[in-house]
Every structure is written in C-alpha cells, then in structure tokens.
Image (tube, coloured by chain):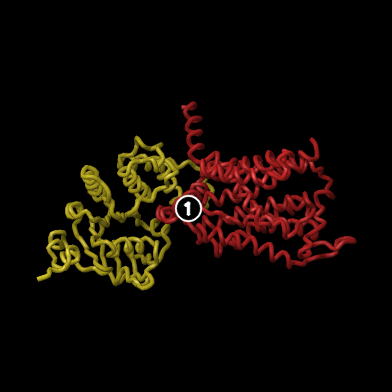
Amino acid sequence: MLAIEGLSKRFGGVQAVQRVDLQVRQNEILGLIGPNGSGKSTIVNLVTGVYAPTEGRVRLRARDITGWAPHRVLAAGIGRTFQSIRLFGGLTVWQNLWVARQAQAGAGRLRGWLAVDRAGMKRIEATLEFCRLLDRRDELARNLAFGEQRRLELARTLTADPEVVLLDEPAAGMNVAEIEELRDRILTLKQRGKTIVLIEHHMELVMEVAERVAVLNFGEKIAEGPPARVQDDERVREAYLGKRRD
Amino acid sequence: MSDYFVSLLIRIGIEAFVALSAYLLLLMGRMSFGQQGFFVIGAYAAGLATALYGMPLLPGVALGALVAALGGALFAGPMAAPRGLAFAAGSLAFGELVRVALLDLYFQGQVGPDLIGPAGPDGFRGIRALFTSGVSVTTYAVGIWLALGVTLLATAFFLRSRWGEALRMIGEDEEAAATVGLPVRRVKVSALAGAGGLAGLGGGLFAHYATYVEPGHADVMLGVHSLAYAFIGGLGTPLGPIIGVALDIGFLESFRFLAGYRMIIFGGLVMGLLIVRPRGLLDEVAVHRLSRFLMRGRR
C-alpha cells in the first residue's frame, strides 16, 4: 500500500533518517516506535511532503509520490495528524473541518465555489459524531480542552477520507480513559478499511492495536515484526534502556 | 458639500484601498510594509495609460490596478515563502526599491504642446484625464466611494468563501493548511497579486485626483499607516480598515485644533489599542460573538 524505499533525510550535519525501508500493508495498523529524536516524525514529514527527502522514494500503491506538495499527498490518499496539535484556533470546531473540506475541493472552480456542499456537510457531521465532538461544533477550537483538540485534529484529517492515516503521537498528554477511547477509535478506523501508521510513545497502546511494529533508533530501522517479538529484541531494549554494563 | 469635505472623503476613500490591501495580507499572517510600492505602480501605470496613451479614465485606472496586481504576482516569486520578520523586511525593501527606481524613471512623450510622463525626481505631472473628461470632483468622490463599496462587498463575499478561509488558514498555520489539502503557494501568490491590485487601484484613483504623482508618494509612511488602519479597525471584518482610515483622516485630521498633534495622538492610539486589543476593535472574537448574537434572533 505505502512503500518507503531507502528514505534518507539530512538536516545540515544531522542525519535525521538513514536509508529506511518500510512497507505498510493495506488495512493494517503499523506501529512506528523509537526513542525521542529517532526520526519518527521526520518520516511522517517526508511522506506527507512537508520535507523533501535527501534520498529514497515514497510510493503509494503504484504511484511515486516522492517530494509531492502536502496538498497533493493528501489528495492522493494520505492524511496525517501532528505531534503538537495544529488547529485553526480562531475558527470553530465545525469551521475547522469545513475549511479542510473546502481546501480539498480545489480552489479555483467557480461552480464549486457557489454550490452548497451538502455531501460535505453530512460528512463533517458524521466525522464530528465519530470523534464525539458534535455538541462542541460551535466552540472556538482554541477554547477546547486538550483531549478534545486532539480529537478535532483527527476529525479534520478524516474529512478528507484518506486511505492511509498517519497518527503522530495521538495519545500524548491523554489520560487513561481518553487513551482507551482513542484505541477504540483506531480499531474502528481499521474496521472501516483504513490503513494506519501509529507513531506512539505509549507502549501499551501500540502493543494492543498494532499488528506489526517497526523500531527506529538514530534514524535507522533496527527492528520490525509482531509486537511481542519486537519487544523482546535485544537491540530494541538497548535503544530504549541503554546497554548492559556487565 | 464643501470642497474640504469632498477632498477629505476622497482621501479616506483612496487610502481605504491601500488599507484593505494591507488587511488582506494581515489575514494571511503577512505584515507588509510595502503596499505603497503597489500604490505608486498603479498610479504611474494609470497615469501613463490616460495621459500618454489617451486611454479614457476608467479603463486607465483599471489598467493601473491590473499592472499593480501583476507586480504583486511577480513580488510573490521571491516573497511567497518568507513569513514573519523576513516578509516584513522584504516588503519594506520592495517599497523602497520601487521608490528609488522611480527616481530614475524618465519616460516622457509629446502630448500636444507639453512633454508628459514620469520625469525622475520631478515626478509625473499632467495626469488630467479626470478634468478633461468633465467629471466634477464631487462626482469623482461619489465614484470612489461606490467603487470602495463594491470592493468591500466583493471582499466580504470573498472572505466568506473558501478563498477567505484559505487566507486565514495560512495566517494561522501554514503547514497545517497544507496538510489538510490547501494548495498553499497558489493561494499566497493570488493574495499578493490581489492585494497589489487593490493598492494599485487606490494609486490610479489618486493620480487622477491629484493630477500628479512622484516617487515620494511611495513614502514608507503610507504603508505603515495602512497597516495601522487595519490594526485599529480590527482584523475580524473588511470594515475594520475603513474604520481605521476614517478614524485617522476623518476624525483626527479634520479637527484643526489637533493640528500638529495628530501623529502623536495617532501613534498613541495605535500603541494603546494594540495592548488592549491586539487584533483591533472589531477582531475575530468580536465579530464571531456579534454574528452569533445576530444569528440567535433568526433561529
């Protein structure tokens, strides 16, 4: 579905990502883990066109989407959320989704400009319902509680109905109840046919939902496989806990 | 109407176009100190069209706006990407660049007995299309305000469309806007061109009223004022910048006893307001509340 081939990114003297290969299969949940600064978010940014890779290719199905601008990557079917929440704070909950929907519809066409997008409104309503935000629809995004903001960010990504969803630390800062809700939501998304890449520090969540896990350390992939096996991998333990001193 | 009142109305109307252009860019998170550059580009281009090439008044002014819009699109080449201080500095440099370039622009032609056209630091005299067309100054003032009204309505409509949403999205968070699917660069280039066109429209209208433009009209204070107008009136509605202009020119300058103190009061007003209401009198929150309040009555 989504193939990352020999992807590298260098920022000045820092090698943020080094020749990473990663295959994401259709309708799977792939966990992408690794210590801070291991290159997880950089990979998301490379895939979604925020940065252009120094080397390597990104393919979605048969299409080479390497270096595409973010809006084209989304149109091709890859949506994402941000590690630090990035909403349009001055807009209401509903408007946040509406502007996303409008942006996706393409800017210039006059007919689309004047027509009322009823299908879009329906879709927004359904997405808000799914993310449990319907009763907050007229609230300004910046006035929402933290957990609600996270849900709104996910909702905004989902309005585009992307096939592949990249979730960049969606559980960061959430409490136990919120994480459980998030887990259910991720599993529902899978049931609905989405392919999901979950970048997360919260191990329990990753181990519960991911079918496969890839581990990054210093920009390189050091392990890949089913959660249980990866957890027991010596190199992974070293990356997280440090080397044994004996 | 007294001549003084009419001239005041004309000045407010003309500067309102420049203020609107600065306002559009502010919505997009860009603080431009260079809109005066587009103002004079429009003024010179419209003046050349009518005075040198005999175009009628209206098409001439429209052409001036178009040339300024084109200038805006070219300006967007290097300046679409930078934001914050880099954009502010770049736009300031652009405004100065235009002014200095005009000091060296000599392009005169024989029209009847006179030599007409830009003459470097001496400016561009003899833009008489308004007066030879027989339109009275009062009619011109009404015309300017009609044009301003139409522009305001169009801007308000535009800002409620997905274009306006796109501007605000870019103003709030460019990466997020791109990620939710907005063709960010295309929107920025269009906005810079549109803002250039608005300032240029003001310039063309000014040139024909004053019959004369000079490089000095691209003084940076025009740009600074137009920014201040948007900030005073508020970023929540396109009426904001007009309120700002009216407050400054209409109120402060028309009271003769304030003469000499105007800039002091104006400066103080801007400072005070930016502390209390950083996004102006009619900011987004105020407009949001107001529209919610008005909608409640309808539901």
Residue B87 x, y percent position in the rendering: 54, 59
Q: Nearer the viewer, residue A118 or A209?
A: A209
Q: Is residue B156 visible?
A: no
Q: Nearer the viewer, residue A207 or B106?
A: B106
Q: Which residue is rendered at x = 48% and y = 41% of the image?
A: A116
Residue with the most extreme right position: B113
Q: Amino acid at mark 1?
A: Ile
Residue B239 x, y percent position in the rendering: 60, 40
Residue B209 x, y percent position in the rendering: 77, 49
Q: Nearer the viewer, residue A25 or B179?
A: B179
Tell me which corner region of the image, top left, top right, bottom left or bottom right, holds residue B266. Answer: top right
Quadrant location of the N terminus of chain B? top right
Q: Is residue A214 visible?
A: yes
Q: Nearer the viewer, residue B193 or A234?
A: A234
Q: Colour of chain A?
A: yellow
Relative to residue A122, is residue B162 drawn left or right? right
Relative to residue B53, is residue A35 drawn left or right? left
Seen in the picture, residue B272 relative to B106 is either above or below; the reply is above
Q: Which residue is rendered at x = 26% and y = 50% of the image?
A: A171
Seen in the picture, residue A182 relative to A38 is either above or below; the reply is above
Q: Which residue is rendered at x = 24% and y = 68% of the image?
A: A221
Tell me which corner region of the image, top left, top right, bottom left or bottom right, holds residue A201. Answer: bottom left
Relative to residue A149, is residue A99 drawn left or right? right
Which chain is red in the picture? B
Circle 1 SS class: helix
Q: How many marks?
A: 1
Q: Which residue is mark 1?
A: B170
